[in-house]
Amino acid sequence: MPHQPHFSGVLPCVTTPLSTVTFEPTVARYSSVTPKPASPVRPTATLYVLPETITFTFGDENSESFRETITTAVQKTIQFWLEQGLVEKPDPLKVFVYEDRDQLVTVSAKEFTIAFGTKHTEADMKQLWTDDTTGMSGPRIFFIYASDKRWRERSSFFREWVVGHELTHVLQFQLMRPKARLTEPVWLQEGFANELASRIFFDVIDSTRFASMKTDAQRVPANITLENSTTKEGLPHFLSLSRIAIYYLIAIAPNDLKSVADYYSAQRTMSWQTAFKQTFQLSYDEFLVQFEQFRVLNFSPWPTPLP
């Protein structure tokens, strides 16, 4: 397939989300821009009213409360986009939620062919819709596999967070339109999706979450970097490393979360590397060096790897 949908499951990107936390004093030492504490953003009491251009298709097996959870999560996510100035209005959107894998395969093959403008066969989709795949997304569309083990066993809060994650991928495509392919490193794609979902759906912001992130980061061997985090050796540490990197990148960005929208919008007319430098005021290679300095200072691996 020339254009593959974004899917959550193969990479450990839909596990425990990270809340927005404040910086410790040591964080600023190796940044060219003084980091700003990431500010919590919570949706207001009145939910965004979804336009008729946003549609939902649920399998017959989905309960009314289940459908309400998904619909509310979409409302909260889009409301967050608007409040933060990430978009002026959302694109039309199709949301599909199925428990039946055969139905999921058939519909997603058809819909992704339309969304990407390239043929996606049912054989293609059968390979992607495994028991470990929670969701897939593309331009103006996303799917949830409601029979995924994590989806079935975790709370409605986790389900909302997954919707926020998948919708962030939809937002990435909207901001880049008419481009329909993300070519940047995977840690950027997934890290932004994890961070935005966490900003929307986490209410508790305290030092214990930073401590948890720090402990996770110290489990990452020193030889695992952003550049090799999707290799066989690095994959188990992908989530921990990518969320730290996004945490840092947004903190040193000129306009906090708005810089994320600026970065993707710039890719309409330029490469992701040029857009990265223009938005974050340093090249991608310079960021990698700076991030490793930040990582050593704040998240140095334990001398003996933790179990």
Image (cartoon, rainbow, N blue to C red):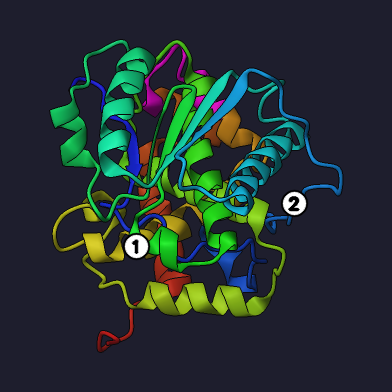
Residue shown at the point (62%, 50%) measured from the top left: 69
Decide: is 297 above or below 261.
below
> Closest to the observer: 3 or 154?
154
Q: Is residue 255 left or right of residue 269?
A: right
Of callouts 2 and 1, which one flags the residue occurring earlier in the amino acid sequence? 2
Calculate the distance from the C-alpha at mark 2 to the C-alpha at mark 1: 30 Å
Give the image location of residue 105, x and y in percent.
Answer: 26, 33
Q: Secondary structure at mark 2?
A: loop
Q: Residue furthest front?
A: 60
Q: Which residue is mark 1?
A: 149
Percent of width and height locating residue 193? 49, 45
Indicate whether 295 appears above or below 133: below
- Residue 67: horizontal and vertical position, in percent? 59, 45
In the image, residue 228 above or below residue 295: above
Pointer 1 local density, CA inside 10 Å: few below 14, some 14–19, many at least 20: few
User: Do the numbered discs 2 and 1 sit on residues whose CB atoms are within 8 Å?
Assistant: no
Residue 270 included in the magenta stretch of the image: yes
User: Residue 91, can we see it?
Assistant: yes
Q: Quadrant of residue 88?
A: top right
Amino acid type, residue under disc 2 in the picture? Val
Q: Residue at left 63%, top 41%?
A: 71
- Total label count? 2
216 up-or-down from 90: above or below: below
Q: Is residue 181 magenta?
A: no
The stretch of residues the image draws in magenta is: 262-273
Which of the two residues, 133 or 152, is positioned nearer the viewer here? 152
Q: Is residue 108 left or right of residue 64?
A: left
Label 2 packing within 10 angstroms: few (<14), some (14-19), many (20+): some
Name the residue carrying label 2: 41
**Which dot, 2 or 1, sits closer to the camera?**
1
Q: Quadrant of residue 148?
A: bottom left
Q: Amino acid at mark 1?
A: Lys
